[in-house]
Every structure is written in C-alpha cells, then in structure tokens.
Image (cartoon, grey):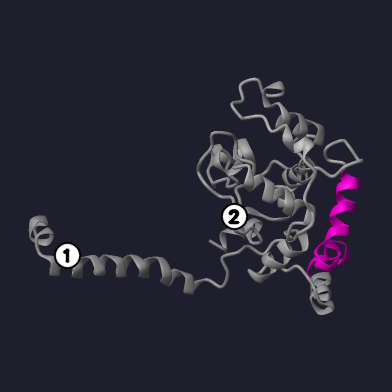
Amino acid sequence: MFKHETVETNAGWLIILTLLAIGVGGLVEIVPLYMIDETVEKVEGVRPYTPLEQRGRDIYIREGCYTCHSQMIRPFRDEMMRYGHYSLAAESQYDHPFQWGSKRTGPDLARLGGKYSNEWHVQHLVAPRSVVPESIMPNYPWLLEDKLDISDISDRMKALKLVGVPYSETKAEFDANVEKFGKDVAEMLDINKATENLIAQAQSGNYDGNKSDITEMDALVAYLQVLGTMVDYSKYDEEYFVNFR
C-alpha cells in the first residue's frame, strides 16, 4: 500500500493515480446516463418565454437578481413545505442560462408566479421595505421610469433559437409549434410578430399599472408572474417523476 509521501514525492505515480481517479469518477457519472432514455421529464405546459417575458428575464439577469435569489427547489421536505413542488429539469429546458443555484439571501423564486398581484410586485420592486419591512433588497425605482427597449427583440429571439429554443421563423417551424404547444402559444413564439406580440401582451397585462407606456417594470413583472406556473402538478403522481432520475 502506498504511503501519501511516496505518491506526493513521485511525479510519475501522482500523475498515474490522478488520471485513474479522474477516469473512475468520470465513468461513475457518465455510464448511468446510457442506462436511461431521458433525463428531462415529459410534462405538459412547459413552453419558451413570450417576447415580453424574455425581455423581463433579460432585465432580471441584468439587475443581478440571481445573486440573491435561486430558482431551484430541492426535493427535501423543508424546501417543498416552504416553496412548493421541487423544480423539474423540464421547467428550465428553454432557459439560457438557467437560474438554478444555492445562494438565498432572499427566498427562492421558482414558484413565485401568481403568488402576489402585479401591484404588489411593482411596489416591492420600487420600495421593498414598504411591503416586507425586514427586506434588505435594494430599491429599483428606475424600472417604473425607463421605457422598455424592444428594438432588438427579434434578434434576441433568433439568438436563442440558435441554441435550441423553438421560436419560429418559417411556416414549417410555426406549424411544428402549433402541434407541440397549440396555436395561441405558437403565435407568441413567432419571431416575425415579436414586436407586435410584445406590445399586445404588455398592454393587455398592464403589469405596471400604466397603459400609456411599456416600461421595464412591465417586462420584469410579466417574467416573475410566469415562474413556476407552466406545469400542473395535480396531473402527475410523484412516482412518475422518479422514472427520470
């Protein structure tokens, strides 16, 4: 049996044993992937973000919200009692980059959608301590003042399409989305109508309470309100998800 000193002072043995450890570790991680058909759960409802939601997500990342909030509920009792059903890989399949993580200066946001009203979100973002006195979150008043830049929304969607997000440009792609997501969703994923769809959703949703302008607040609240709302967990038994682990 080798002593630590023998390995640490002999470059040859150190290299050989290091490569052996890496090889075994790699095999342990990689081989099981060939034993299962799919690691992303097959669930209904998950779709790419609409143009407005996607711009909201861009703002969420720009403002560094991910540095204090995760979007990943782990499969532990305490987590699920506080936040809801644990996060599925399927829910993040169109996220680039995904917003998982373990940093929780603030609560996890994976199931935030629909929990509070649009008005609450606006007030919370403008002056967090007015609704959560113990909050240490900074104020974001400019979101309510700055108009949303929508000039490049089509280019943003095209970039995401390159990495696999099924936004459509051609009729064939649109028809495929109709079959997969339904016509209403497919319409929202059409790059050729990106600006039109963004404006329509912002005006109908009126997320910031002001229909005269489309602000960054509109986009961010639209994004926050969709988080965790796509999958209806009442349709699935817990045993169903075990098959994908």
Query: Which residue in the structure is indicated by mark 2?
Result: 98
Q: Is residue 95 above or below residue 206?
A: below
The residue type indicated by label 2 comes to Phe
Q: In the rendered structure, which disc, 2 or 1, sits on the residue that comes first in sequence?
A: 1
Q: CA distance from mark 2 to mark 1?
A: 37 Å
Image quadrant in which you'd find residue 169? bottom right
Left or right? Give the position of 16 relative to 242. left
Residue drawn 19% across and 68% down?
Answer: 15
Left or right? Give the position of 115 relative to 94. right
Q: Is residue 111 above or below residue 139?
A: below
Q: Which residues are magenta?
A: 180-205
Residue drawn 77% across and 40% down?
Answer: 146
| Residue 182 belongs to magenta span | yes
Depth check, front residue: 94 or 244? 94
Residue drawn 71% across and 51% down?
Answer: 233
Q: Main secondary structure of the magenta part?
A: helix
Q: Is residue 234 visible?
A: no
Image quadrant in which you'd find residue 167? bottom right
The residue type indicated by label 1 comes to Leu
Labels 2 and 1 touching (C-beta < 8 A):
no
Depth check, front residue: 214 or 71? 214
Q: What is the number of the mark on residue 14?
A: 1
Depth check, front residue: 73 or 7? 7
Element at label 1: helix
